[in-house]
Image (tube, helix red, strand yellow):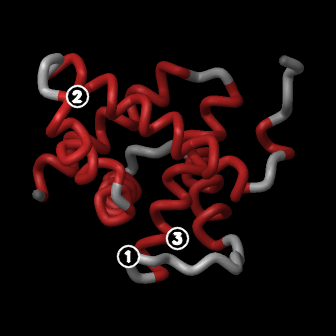
Amino acid sequence: MKQIDPKSINTTMLAYLGDAVYEVFIREKIVHEQPHDAGRAHHRAVRYVSADGQAKAVKAMESAGFLTDEELALYKRARNHRTMSRPQHTDPKTYKMATGFEALLGYLHLKGDPVRIKEIAEEAVNIIDSVQ
């Protein structure tokens, strides 16, 4: 696969990729914690991968100064990106925040920074666990 500059990618596409990156992180977490409980795996994952959970996590990270200036700028650019899609199960503000979170993870994936992806995803899990 050819190398691509993540800064040149539309934030909607970054979110598309970031959604998958975060989903794999969460699924691996669940498999490691309870490798013999596939029946409830999806229900455990929902709290982490839902727009509501992602929005709470990224809002807390933003408030705490957890994100670098570059990450914060990318998150805000994606969050504020105008889109025609309408969220089905959440309000538009929450949906946009979650999209920004996913775009950030997609950006970091294309940038080749698995360490930072892990730090952000683990922080998101910790935040979601503390508020739910």
- Residue at mark 2: 30
Considering only order in the chain, which callout, 1 or 3, is on the residue closer to the N terminus? 1
Furthest residue to the front? Answer: 39
Q: Tell me the distance, in whole angstroms, between the alpha carbons under discs 2 and 3.
A: 26 Å
At label 1, the amino acid type is: His
Q: Please state the horizontal and vertical placement of residue 8, each as a whole percent of the image.
A: 86, 45
Q: Identify the disc placed on residue 89.
A: 1
Give the residue drawn at x 45%, y 77%: 88
- Pointer 1 and pointer 2: residues touching (CB < 8 Å)? no
Q: Please state the horizontal and vertical placement of residue 55, each as a whole percent of the image.
A: 37, 63
- Pointer 3 and pointer 1: residues touching (CB < 8 Å)? no
At label 2, the amino acid type is: Ile
Q: What SS does tag 3 mark? A: helix
Give the residue drawn at x 65%, y 21%: 112
Q: Residues within 10 Å of mark 1 (few under 14, many from 20)?
A: few
Query: Up-down: is 66 above or below 121?
Result: below
Foreground label between 3 and 1: 1
Q: Identify the disc placed on residue 126.
A: none
Q: Nearer the viewer, residue 113 or 23?
A: 23
Q: Tell me the distance, in whole angstroms, between the alpha carbons under discs 1 and 2.
A: 24 Å
Q: Quadrant of the N terminus?
A: top right
Q: Nearer the viewer, residue 74 or 38?
A: 38
Q: Please state the horizontal and vertical placement of residue 24, each as a whole percent of the image.
A: 43, 30
- Residue at mark 3: 96
Q: Tell me the distance, in whole angstroms, between the alpha carbons under discs 3 and 1.
A: 13 Å
Query: Up-down: is 54 above or below 28?
Result: below
Give the residue drawn at x 63%, y 73%: 80
Query: Up-down: is 22 above or below 51?
Result: above
